[in-house]
Image (spheres, rainbow, N blue to C red):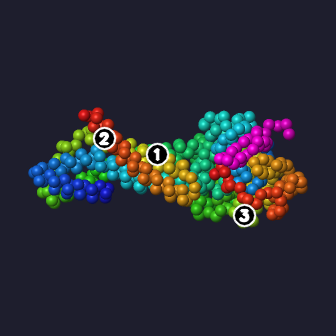
Amino acid sequence: MSETPLVHLENIVVRLGDKMVLDEINLKVFTGDRLVILGQSGSGKSTMLRLILGILRPISGVVRYRRLQVQKLSRSKLNLFRSRVGMVYQDSALISSMTVRENLALPVEELSRKPRKEINALIKENLEMVGMSGTEEKLPSELSGGMRKRVSLARAMMMQPELILFDEPTAGLDPVISSVIDELMINLSGKTNTTSIIVTHEMDSAFKVATRMAMLYQGKIIEETTPDRFRASANPVVRQFVTGTTEGPITKTPLNADSSK
Amino acid sequence: MMVSFFLGLTMALLTGDQLEKFGAERLVPTVISIAFTRELGPLLTGIVLAARIGAAYTAELGTMQVSEEVEAIEAMGIGPLRFLVAPRLVAIASLMPCLSVLSVVAALIGSALISWSALNLVPGAYFDAVLTSLIVSDIVTGLFKAMFFGLLIGLIACYQGLTIIGGAEGVGKATTDSVVISITTVIGFDTLFNVILTKITG
């Protein structure tokens, strides 16, 4: 592909303490992609999302968003860039003291001068999109895990972002709700051509939503291809991860918990 | 207010008892009003607010930090310092002088009651003495101290909350640390402030 990638990680190195989290990572994400990044817990998947958002800085390498170099952005430009990117956290990260309406209105009220009427219309539209109409006045504590995830996705969509980052979007959810979230992610990119980077280690969900898949193992991307080719990969690590067998090269010793947290 | 009220009672009782020996019990309103306006009002309010609001700030921000809410705010492009810290600092710095005034009033009421019942000083005369004793610089000093202590408590509490390491255990530890550090710092700065002020005014 000759087009400019939306996100481009170039030779990224991240080390936390003695642990090499990301070792010379190169990755391109193009507009419209639904890239699923797979890997064991603690392999640096969430770290990659935080790098893209500029929350974490690499030891070396460059994170580009279109032609912008994220690490070199001033504070105000970084905030402007972040407003174009949505993020859905593993635990939703809704502001617990705010209602659903306030959570959704927050980025728009803080970052734009849209009138109240327009903000309310956006809230209604996004809640409808995720099937959560009628929950505007509820607090996050009154919602189930799956509902919070959907509200979190609606919040991420409020600024009509070009890119959405999903950190374990289906972790801890039952299969039905997981499928609902998967379908939301697929519909989202279909309707709005939003690019998605999805971090997960749930294979069913990954194969369902991905247009491309990358496998992170011991700080390196060892495979990056289409879902079909990923499933048929000859790489023993990928094969073991896809089949979920205990026999194989993946170490049985769990790595440290996600190092960026 | 209750703390100040009871302390006002106690101070009037003890100082009155001692001053009575020299026939100077009529100085009780002067002693109490100056002590509370310049010193004890802001200090007591600071201690109570460090325990009440400082702890709440740390616990709230700490919980938000642990549950990634702070990072989510940052990821939206909203500065956490502007959105989470600045309003809290403004609130506590504005609240402290107001509560400090209430604290002084409560202490004066408490000491007036004791002066009336134990020292035969009628409330009218008591409050006349208070108004005569206090000068503008006493009031300004007290209000300035209160505002400064409020800022200190807010800064320490927010810093402790936003730099939490660990989960629920971390929140508990940071909250305790926040209260201890705030109270110690407020008393320390109060001492420093008094030393400087004494040097300046001779």
Q: Nearer the viewer, mark 1 or mark 2?
A: 2
Residue designated by label 3: A177
Give the magenta part as a residue range.
Answer: A1-28
State the CA–CA distance, disc 1 to disc 3: 42 Å
Residue designated by label 2: B194
Query: Under tag 1, what secondary structure?
Result: helix
Q: Residues within 10 Å of mark 1 (few under 14, many from 20)?
A: many
Q: Nearer the viewer, mark 1 or mark 3?
A: 1
Instruction: Give the chain letter at badge 2.
Output: B
Do the residues bearing badges 1 and 2 touch, measured as CB atoms within 8 Å?
A: no
Q: Position of residue A65 (x, y in %)?
A: 72, 39
The amino acid sitting under disc 1 is: Leu
The amino acid sitting under disc 3 is: Ile
Residue designated by label 1: B155
The amino acid sitting under disc 2 is: Asn
**Can residue A48 be seen?**
no
Q: Residues within 10 Å of mark 3 (few under 14, many from 20)?
A: some
